[in-house]
Image (cartoon, grey):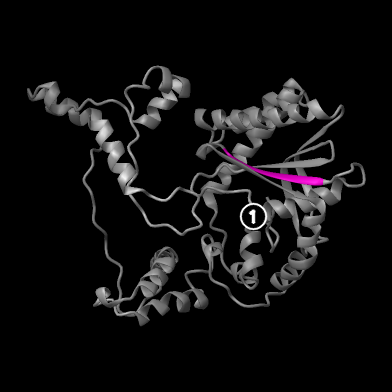
Amino acid sequence: MSHALLSPSSAARWLACTPSARLESQFPDSSGAAAAEGTVAHALGELLLRECLGTVEFDEWQVLFAEIEGSEYYGSDMQRYAEDYRDFVIERYHDALASTPDPRIFLEQKLDMTEFVPEGFGTGDCIILADGTLDIIDLKYGKGVLVNAQENKQMMLYGLAAMRQFEIMYDIRRVRMTIYQPRLDNYSSYELPVEELLHWAETELKERAKMAFEGTGELVVGKHCGFCKVKARCRAMAEYNMQLAQHDFKQPELLDDHEVSEILKRLDLLTDWAGSVKKFALQEALGGRKWEGFKLVEGRSVRRYVDEDAAAKAVLKQGWPEESVFNKKIIGLTAMEKLIGKPGMVSILGDHVDKPPGAPTLVPESDKRPEYNAAASDFAKELAEA
């Protein structure tokens, strides 16, 4: 993981909004538990791959696995997801073996990006070189946001750096960049000729990276703002969202179609930004800061059992029947899949599980899901009820 000013993981942000990197450096790192969990998952994935490839001695494996197993983040789920990642990489490696007699695989490879990004360094989780193609695979252990490889700036930066690092030894003509996100059952690949990657570097990356390193350029609001540490204090974000105030919300029926569309385009950013401002203000208030017109109070509290077993025993002791004290129901579908596995969900519960159509929701036209068809949905419902 890189701690440089221009981190590869935030490349999409500082390429779109060049002053953001310098501004973010003024704020503390808030990655916390998620980053620590990801580090353990990456270490486990690497160890499982080294074991499979025969590049780790048993004694070393025991020591490394003991460290991972002792982590508060390790568990059966992480083990399963890391094994999925291992199997995915090994399948890619076997594909390379089928086309090339001597493919090479590199794990957790340090990458020098300074030719393209000032003080830029990163780590490639897995790099496979075979038959003119450099295949770089990035493990994403997070499950909050689905990540796509298509034109992914972080992956393009990794691809460039890896290509430069290995081009002396290999004839690399194409770079394939793959995101593997096991907790969301998501993987995607994006492939480019080396010439196109270099063209992007010369016409966009280098200049934008220089501006970002210097902290120059204009603040730009967009989807890249999602994880920005500055957004709660960002004036450009505030001005962008405050433009909604020009619309008369007291009489929404008088908004024309264009105005409604413009509001819809901004709502996700608006609500996300408003939440960030509220979170920032609360954290500052907890630290002693006073906000004019506001005060800290104790929030709503919910009752809970100190010890459920002890509470149940106390009630049962007084004579109430067990069926009145306990509610018994089948475990949820996610827990059930973990119990019996995906094959079991099909063979055992195939006739007992239904997935009804989701409720209609408005999304941008760029969304890949097919457009909602009310008539088709009604027809499907009628068939189900017949």
- Residue 97 is left or right of residue 69, and the answer is right
The part of the chain drawn in magenta is: 174-181
Residue located at (36% from left, 53% from top): 361
Q: Is residue 180 magenta?
A: yes
Q: Which residue is drawn at 60% across and 38% down?
A: 40
- Relative to residue 203, is residue 146 drawn left or right? left
Q: Does the magenta stretch include residue 339?
A: no
Q: Disc 1 residue type? A: Ser
The structure residue drawn at horizontal position 35% and vertical position 34%, both measured from the top left corner, is 355
Q: Where is residue 249 in the image (x, y as percent from the top left)?
A: 28, 76
Instruction: Give whichever of 295, 48 is nearer the camera.
Output: 48
Tell me the crowding category of disc 1: few under 14, some 14 to 19, or many 20 or more residues within 10 angstroms, Cα based.
some
Task: Kindly give the residue lying farthest to the top in the view shown.
Answer: 348
> Which residue is outermost to the left?
319
Q: Can residue 287 be seen in this view?
A: no
Q: Name the residue under label 1.
A: 9
Q: Quadrant of residue 220?
A: bottom right
Residue at disc 1, secondary structure: helix
State the quadrant of the C terminus: top left
Image location (x, y in percent) of residue 207: 76, 70
Q: Is the magenta stretch mostly helix, strand or loop?
A: strand
Q: Which residue is drawn at 38% across and 17% down?
A: 348
